[in-house]
Image (cartoon, helix red, strand yellow):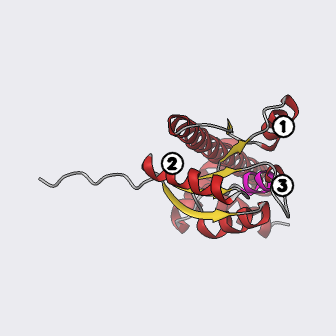
Amino acid sequence: MSMPKDPAPVTVLVAEDEALIRMDLVEMLGECGYLVVGQAADGQAAVDQTRALRPDVVFMDIAMPRRDGLSAAEEIIADGLAPVVMVTAFSQREAVQRAAAAGVLGYLVKPFGKADLTPAIEIAVARWQQMLDLDKQITGLRERQTARELVDAAKRRLEQDLSLSEPDAFAWLRRAAMDQRVTLAEIAARVLAETT
């Protein structure tokens, strides 16, 4: 019997403009068992590296040159790239509210210790996965609704054009889909395309 493989470590991108703080954070993350895959000194570099490296989570400072961390976080989150944990000296309500509005999933106020990192990462990664799962469910529901609407429209077309009852029109669509080895939605779309 083979031993189960250890799960891959969570990958982290660290975006912090102060080199000493960035190095300390990278060291702490490594000691906690996380794999730092990239480091950025400004918000735009953080966005670019997140696109290229696809980390599991991004640790982002708010106040950075070239592009601030909040606008970078907004883009990273809006584009579905990774969850973001803000790492900042700012604990004012306005900064927290802006981070929440940006979709940030964690917020650590400096100074913090190693013990603060794991809960922030685990919660951010778990919430991110929940959001991705919910997006998939919503997409699936939309696709099913669209398919249902196509099938209903094709049934109405067949009822009119072939003088079929609703059950007979549905049976016709089902037989045609099985014969052609396609979905009901695909056959419905063909019926609608052929009769327009």
Residue under circle 1?
A: 95
Quadrant for the C terminus, please: bottom right
- The quadrant in which residue 94 appears is top right
Range of magenta residues: 71-79
Depicted 6 relative to depicted 141: above or below: below
The numbered mark, 2 or 1, whose residue comes first in the sequence reads 2
Front-most of residues 2 and 29 = 29
Label of residue 28 in the image: 2
Q: Estimate the spatial distance between the alpha carbons at disc 1 and disc 3, rounded to whole Å.
A: 12 Å
Residue 104: percent from the left, percent from the top? 73, 42
Given the image, on which type of amino acid does mark 1 rest? Ala
Q: Estimate the spatial distance between the alpha carbons at disc 2 and disc 1, rounded to whole Å.
A: 25 Å
Residue at figure coordinates x 84%, y 37% from the top left: 95
Disc 1 element: helix
- Furthest residue in direction right, as rendered: 94
Residue 86: percent from the left, percent from the top? 71, 44
